[in-house]
Image (cartoon, rainbow, N blue to C red):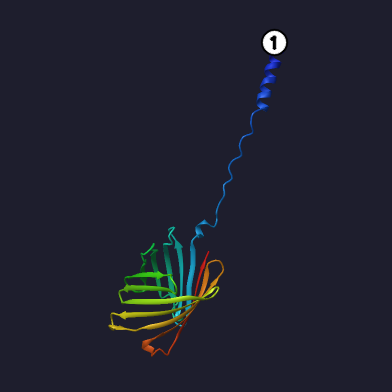
Amino acid sequence: FGGFLATGLLKAVLSARDNQPEPAPAPTRVVNTGAPLRGVRLSGSIGGSGWTGAVTKSVGPKGSSLRLGFAGSASKALTEVSAGLVYKGVGKYPDVELATKVVPGAPGAAHSAKVTKALPHGVRSTWSASLSPSGASLGAALSRAVLKATDLALRLELPLSYATKRVDPALAAEVTHKVGKDGKVVGTVQTRASAGFRGTKLDTKYDIGL
Protein backbone atom coordinates (compact mmCIF):
# COMPACT_ATOMS: atom_id res chain seq x y z
CA PHE A 1 0.00 0.00 0.00
CA GLY A 2 2.87 2.38 0.89
CA GLY A 3 4.52 1.84 -2.50
CA PHE A 4 1.24 2.48 -4.30
CA LEU A 5 0.76 5.73 -2.33
CA ALA A 6 4.29 6.94 -3.04
CA THR A 7 3.89 6.21 -6.74
CA GLY A 8 0.61 8.13 -6.83
CA LEU A 9 2.12 11.16 -5.09
CA LEU A 10 5.09 11.18 -7.49
CA LYS A 11 2.78 11.09 -10.52
CA ALA A 12 0.70 13.94 -9.08
CA VAL A 13 3.80 16.13 -8.52
CA LEU A 14 5.11 15.47 -12.04
CA SER A 15 1.69 16.19 -13.57
CA ALA A 16 1.37 19.48 -11.64
CA ARG A 17 4.84 20.56 -12.75
CA ASP A 18 4.10 19.75 -16.42
CA ASN A 19 0.83 21.72 -16.31
CA GLN A 20 2.43 24.94 -15.00
CA PRO A 21 2.29 27.84 -17.55
CA GLU A 22 5.50 28.92 -19.24
CA PRO A 23 7.05 32.05 -17.64
CA ALA A 24 6.40 35.26 -19.57
CA PRO A 25 9.40 36.44 -21.60
CA ALA A 26 11.27 39.49 -20.32
CA PRO A 27 10.12 42.70 -22.04
CA THR A 28 12.34 43.85 -24.88
CA ARG A 29 13.99 47.19 -24.19
CA VAL A 30 13.89 49.46 -27.21
CA VAL A 31 16.66 52.05 -27.33
CA ASN A 32 15.74 55.06 -29.47
CA THR A 33 19.11 56.35 -30.61
CA GLY A 34 17.49 59.22 -32.51
CA ALA A 35 15.70 60.73 -29.50
CA PRO A 36 18.50 63.18 -28.54
CA LEU A 37 18.47 64.62 -32.08
CA ARG A 38 14.71 64.91 -32.37
CA GLY A 39 13.74 68.54 -32.89
CA VAL A 40 17.33 69.62 -33.69
CA ARG A 41 17.97 71.88 -36.68
CA LEU A 42 21.20 73.07 -38.28
CA SER A 43 21.30 76.44 -40.02
CA GLY A 44 23.82 78.96 -41.23
CA SER A 45 24.91 81.29 -44.00
CA ILE A 46 27.89 81.95 -46.26
CA GLY A 47 28.59 85.33 -47.83
CA GLY A 48 31.21 87.88 -48.67
CA SER A 49 31.38 89.17 -45.09
CA GLY A 50 31.87 85.74 -43.51
CA TRP A 51 29.87 82.78 -42.29
CA THR A 52 27.39 81.92 -39.55
CA GLY A 53 26.24 78.63 -38.07
CA ALA A 54 23.67 77.63 -35.48
CA VAL A 55 22.20 74.61 -33.73
CA THR A 56 18.55 74.97 -32.68
CA LYS A 57 16.70 72.58 -30.36
CA SER A 58 12.92 72.56 -30.05
CA VAL A 59 11.85 72.63 -26.39
CA GLY A 60 8.06 72.81 -26.50
CA PRO A 61 5.01 71.57 -28.41
CA LYS A 62 4.31 75.07 -29.78
CA GLY A 63 7.70 75.43 -31.49
CA SER A 64 9.69 77.35 -28.86
CA SER A 65 13.41 76.64 -29.08
CA LEU A 66 16.93 77.16 -27.74
CA ARG A 67 19.65 78.32 -30.10
CA LEU A 68 23.47 78.27 -30.02
CA GLY A 69 25.18 80.24 -32.77
CA PHE A 70 28.64 81.03 -34.11
CA ALA A 71 30.02 83.50 -36.63
CA GLY A 72 33.34 83.99 -38.36
CA SER A 73 35.02 85.93 -41.13
CA ALA A 74 37.69 85.38 -43.76
CA SER A 75 40.29 87.08 -41.56
CA LYS A 76 39.25 85.54 -38.23
CA ALA A 77 37.99 82.02 -37.63
CA LEU A 78 35.56 82.98 -34.84
CA THR A 79 34.16 86.47 -34.36
CA GLU A 80 31.21 85.82 -32.02
CA VAL A 81 29.31 83.21 -30.03
CA SER A 82 25.62 83.66 -29.27
CA ALA A 83 22.87 81.90 -27.35
CA GLY A 84 19.17 82.59 -27.57
CA LEU A 85 15.67 81.58 -26.56
CA VAL A 86 12.76 81.84 -29.00
CA TYR A 87 9.22 81.79 -27.65
CA LYS A 88 6.63 81.00 -30.32
CA GLY A 89 3.53 83.09 -29.83
CA VAL A 90 0.11 81.46 -30.05
CA GLY A 91 -2.82 83.06 -31.86
CA LYS A 92 -2.55 86.84 -31.93
CA TYR A 93 0.64 86.95 -29.84
CA PRO A 94 4.02 87.50 -31.56
CA ASP A 95 7.18 85.44 -31.38
CA VAL A 96 9.77 86.75 -28.92
CA GLU A 97 13.51 86.11 -29.21
CA LEU A 98 16.00 86.91 -26.43
CA ALA A 99 19.69 86.55 -27.27
CA THR A 100 23.13 87.10 -25.76
CA LYS A 101 26.25 87.61 -27.87
CA VAL A 102 29.89 87.32 -26.78
CA VAL A 103 32.85 88.48 -28.87
CA PRO A 104 36.00 86.44 -28.14
CA GLY A 105 38.62 88.62 -26.49
CA ALA A 106 36.18 91.44 -25.68
CA PRO A 107 34.81 92.06 -22.17
CA GLY A 108 31.14 91.66 -21.34
CA ALA A 109 28.22 90.45 -23.40
CA ALA A 110 25.62 92.15 -25.59
CA HIS A 111 21.95 91.34 -25.05
CA SER A 112 19.19 91.82 -27.61
CA ALA A 113 15.46 91.27 -27.97
CA LYS A 114 13.32 90.82 -31.07
CA VAL A 115 9.56 90.61 -31.59
CA THR A 116 8.17 89.09 -34.80
CA LYS A 117 4.60 88.66 -36.02
CA ALA A 118 3.60 86.84 -39.20
CA LEU A 119 0.27 87.43 -40.94
CA PRO A 120 -0.38 84.44 -43.23
CA HIS A 121 -3.49 85.72 -45.04
CA GLY A 122 -3.16 86.45 -48.77
CA VAL A 123 0.37 87.65 -49.49
CA ARG A 124 2.22 86.57 -46.35
CA SER A 125 3.66 89.47 -44.37
CA THR A 126 6.04 89.50 -41.41
CA TRP A 127 6.66 92.47 -39.12
CA SER A 128 9.50 92.76 -36.63
CA ALA A 129 11.10 95.11 -34.11
CA SER A 130 14.40 94.60 -32.30
CA LEU A 131 16.54 96.30 -29.65
CA SER A 132 20.24 95.89 -28.89
CA PRO A 133 22.97 97.95 -27.17
CA SER A 134 24.07 99.37 -30.53
CA GLY A 135 20.69 100.31 -31.95
CA ALA A 136 17.11 99.48 -32.83
CA SER A 137 15.46 98.22 -35.98
CA LEU A 138 12.05 97.88 -37.62
CA GLY A 139 11.45 95.39 -40.40
CA ALA A 140 8.76 94.24 -42.80
CA ALA A 141 8.66 91.43 -45.35
CA LEU A 142 6.21 90.29 -48.02
CA SER A 143 6.43 86.76 -49.42
CA ARG A 144 4.48 84.45 -51.67
CA ALA A 145 4.93 81.12 -53.43
CA VAL A 146 6.08 81.40 -57.04
CA LEU A 147 6.62 77.67 -57.68
CA LYS A 148 5.62 74.49 -55.89
CA ALA A 149 8.71 74.47 -53.65
CA THR A 150 9.97 78.03 -54.12
CA ASP A 151 8.99 81.28 -52.38
CA LEU A 152 9.99 84.85 -53.17
CA ALA A 153 10.24 87.51 -50.44
CA LEU A 154 10.97 91.24 -50.39
CA ARG A 155 12.31 92.73 -47.15
CA LEU A 156 12.70 96.26 -45.85
CA GLU A 157 14.77 97.02 -42.74
CA LEU A 158 15.08 100.37 -40.97
CA PRO A 159 18.03 100.04 -38.56
CA LEU A 160 18.83 102.99 -36.28
CA SER A 161 22.41 103.31 -35.00
CA TYR A 162 22.76 104.89 -31.56
CA ALA A 163 26.33 105.95 -32.37
CA THR A 164 25.55 107.86 -35.58
CA LYS A 165 21.90 108.62 -34.76
CA ARG A 166 21.05 107.71 -38.34
CA VAL A 167 18.78 105.22 -40.07
CA ASP A 168 20.34 103.21 -42.90
CA PRO A 169 17.45 101.57 -44.81
CA ALA A 170 18.16 98.21 -46.41
CA LEU A 171 16.26 96.39 -49.15
CA ALA A 172 16.60 92.66 -49.79
CA ALA A 173 15.16 90.05 -52.13
CA GLU A 174 15.11 86.42 -51.00
CA VAL A 175 14.45 83.21 -52.91
CA THR A 176 13.65 80.23 -50.68
CA HIS A 177 13.71 76.71 -52.09
CA LYS A 178 12.44 73.84 -49.96
CA VAL A 179 14.64 70.72 -49.89
CA GLY A 180 13.99 67.33 -48.33
CA LYS A 181 11.30 66.84 -45.73
CA ASP A 182 11.53 70.21 -43.96
CA GLY A 183 14.79 71.84 -45.06
CA LYS A 184 15.36 74.95 -47.13
CA VAL A 185 18.05 76.93 -48.94
CA VAL A 186 17.75 80.73 -49.12
CA GLY A 187 19.54 83.05 -51.52
CA THR A 188 19.60 86.76 -50.57
CA VAL A 189 20.56 89.93 -52.45
CA GLN A 190 20.71 93.02 -50.22
CA THR A 191 21.52 96.69 -50.76
CA ARG A 192 21.63 99.70 -48.40
CA ALA A 193 20.90 103.39 -48.68
CA SER A 194 24.41 104.23 -47.44
CA ALA A 195 25.71 102.55 -50.62
CA GLY A 196 23.30 104.51 -52.80
CA PHE A 197 21.29 101.31 -53.33
CA ARG A 198 23.93 100.35 -55.89
CA GLY A 199 26.26 97.93 -54.12
CA THR A 200 24.82 94.52 -53.31
CA LYS A 201 25.53 91.88 -50.69
CA LEU A 202 25.02 88.23 -51.56
CA ASP A 203 24.30 85.53 -48.96
CA THR A 204 23.31 81.88 -49.11
CA LYS A 205 21.55 80.37 -46.10
CA TYR A 206 20.58 76.82 -45.24
CA ASP A 207 18.24 75.31 -42.64
CA ILE A 208 17.84 71.54 -42.23
CA GLY A 209 16.28 69.29 -39.61
CA LEU A 210 17.90 66.13 -38.25
Question: Is residue 107 shown left or right of residue 208?
Answer: left
In the foreground, 51 or 86: 86
Measuring from the top left, give residue 79's x and y in whole percent.
Answer: 41, 76
The residue where tag 1 is placed is 2
In the foreground, 69 or 200: 200
- Answer yes or no: is residue 103 visible: no
Question: Is residue 57 shown left or right of residue 113?
Answer: right
Outermost residue, front side: 122
Measuring from the top left, give residue 176's x and y in whole percent.
Answer: 50, 75
In the foreground, 202 or 79: 202
Dot 1 crowding, Cα within 10 Å, few <14, some 14–19, many 20+: few
Under tag 1, what secondary structure?
helix
Residue in the picture at 38% in, 69% down? 117
Task: Classify the position of the N terminus by image quarter.
Answer: top right
* Looking at the image, residue 56 lies above or below residue 72: above
Residue in the picture at 34% in, 76% down? 138
Residue in the picture at 43% in, 81% down? 172
- Answer yes or no: is residue 139 visible: yes
Which quadrant would residue 7 be assigned to in this image? top right
